[in-house]
C-alpha cells in the first residue's frame, strides 16, 4: 500500500510540473504571438540618465507611455505629478519613458529638476542622431504618446493631461487594471494558482506517505503486550522445531504469528488475533 501511494504521489508531482511548464510556455507563446512585429510608432534607441541603453521596440507586447518634456518647462513639472500618480497606480504594469527634448541639458540637470521621479521610471535626453522629438513631430511640451501592445500609437496629447484621462487611454491601449492583476488579468494567473494548489497537495501527500504510513520491511510499533508475548513465545517454538524437525513434515509445520505468537492457518493474510499483516 505504501509503495502504491508513493507511486501515485510521485506521478501527481510529475503531472503538476508538466502542467506548470505548459502554462508558462503557453503564456509566453501567447505574448509572442500577439506581438510579432512592431507597429507604426517610430522606433528609437537612447541611453537613459543611468547610462543604460534601451530600444523602444524591445518593449513589444507592453503598453508604453512616452512623455516629452524639458527641465525649464513649468507645465512639464505639473504633468510629472500626474505621471507620478499613474506610476503609483500601475507600478510596472506599463513602460514609462520621460524624454528631455532639450539636448543642451545634462543628466545632472534632469536629476536636479525631477529628483522625486527620476528613479521611478526611465528618464533620458534626446541624444538620438535622428532626434526622437523630430520622429514624433514634437512642437510643444509636455506632449504625451501612448503606444499599445502591438507597437502602434493609440493616443497623443499636448499640454497637461490628467491622471484619469491617461488611465482611460492606457486601458484602451491594453493595460489591465490592478484589480484584475497588475500587467495582466486574473484569468491569466488562474492556471498558475491551480497548479500551485495541486503541487501543495502533492507535497502534503508525499509527506503523509513518507512519515505517517508504516515502513515496509520492519515490524511497526505495537502495544507492549504483543511485543512481550512475541518475544517470549518465539524462542520456544523455534527451539522446539529445531530439536524435533522430523516430527513436523514440511507440509504440516505449524506457523505462528510473529507478533502475538498465536497459531495461524495457511492462507491467512492478517492475524485474526492481533490484526497485524502477515
Image: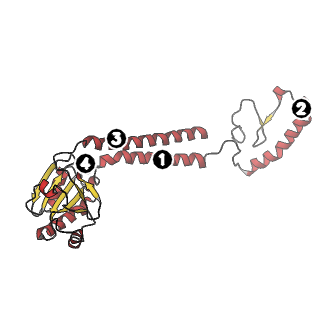
Residue 133 spot, x, y in % from top left: 13, 58
Q: Residue at x 76, y 43 (%)?
A: 260
List the residue tagged with mark 4. Answer: 60
List the residue tagged with mark 2. Answer: 245
- Element at label 4: loop
Give the mark, 3 or 1, whose residue is nearer the N terminus: 3
- State the separation of the CA atoms marked 3 and 2: 71 Å
Residue 271 spot, x, y in % from top left: 71, 38
Q: Which of marks 2 and 1 is in front?
A: 1
- State the separation of the CA atoms marked 4 and 1: 38 Å
- State the separation of the CA atoms marked 2 and 1: 54 Å
Q: For mark 1, does the 10 Å Cα neighbourhood hold few (<14), some (14 to 19), or many (20 or more) residues?
A: some
* In the foreground, 174 or 233: 174
List the residue tagged with mark 1. Answer: 201
Can residue 92 be seen in the rendering of this structure?
A: no
- Element at label 2: helix
* In the foreground, 198 or 260: 198
List the residue tagged with mark 3. Answer: 26
Q: Nearer the viewer, mark 4 or mark 1?
A: 4
Is residue 32 depicted above or below 126 in this figure? above
Amino acid at each position: 500500500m505504501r509503495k502504491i501511494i508513493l507511486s501515485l504521489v510521485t506521478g501527481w508531482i510529475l503531472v503538476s510540473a508538466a502542467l506548470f511548464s505548459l502554462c508558462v510556455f503557453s503564456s509566453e507563446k501567447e505574448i509572442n504571438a500577439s506581438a510579432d512585429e512592431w507597429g507604426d510608432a517610430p522606433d528609437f534607441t537612447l541611453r537613459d540618465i543611468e547610462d543604460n541603453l534601451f530600444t523602444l521596440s524591445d518593449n513589444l507586447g507592453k503598453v508604453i507611455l512616452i512623455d516629452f518634456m524639458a527641465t525649464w518647462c513649468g507645465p512639464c513639472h505639473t504633468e510629472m505629478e500626474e505621471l507620478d500618480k499613474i506610476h503609483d497606480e500601475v507600478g510596472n504594469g506599463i513602460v514609462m519613458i520621460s524624454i528631455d527634448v532639450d539636448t543642451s541639458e545634462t543628466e545632472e540637470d534632469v536629476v536636479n529638476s525631477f529628483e522625486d521621479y527620476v528613479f521611478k521610471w526611465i528618464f533620458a535626453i534626446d541624444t538620438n542622431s535622428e532626434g526622437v522629438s523630430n520622429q514624433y513631430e514634437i512642437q510643444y511640451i509636455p506632449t504625451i504618446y501612448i503606444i499599445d501592445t502591438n507597437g502602434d500609437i493609440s493616443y497623443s496629447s499636448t499640454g497637461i493631461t490628467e491622471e484619469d484621462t491617461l488611465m482611460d487611454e492606457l486601458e484602451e491601449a491594453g493595460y489591465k487594471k490592478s484589480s484584475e492583476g497588475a500587467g495582466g488579468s486574473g484569468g491569466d494567473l488562474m492556471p498558475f494558482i491551480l497548479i500551485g494548489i495541486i503541487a501543495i497537495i502533492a507535497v502534503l501527500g508525499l509527506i503523509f506517505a513518507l512519515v505517517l504510513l508504516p515502513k515496509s520491511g520492519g515490524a511497526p510499533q505495537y502495544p507492549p503486550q504483543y511485543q512481550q508475548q512475541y518475544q517470549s513465545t518465539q524462542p520456544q517454538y523455534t527451539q522446539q522445531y529445531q530439536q524435533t524437525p522430523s516430527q513436523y513434515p514440511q507440509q504440516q509445520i505449524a506457523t505462528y504469528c510473529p507478533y502475538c505468537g498465536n497459531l495461524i492457518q495457511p492462507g491467512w493474510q492478517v492475524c485474526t488475533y492481533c490484526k497485524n499483516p502477515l
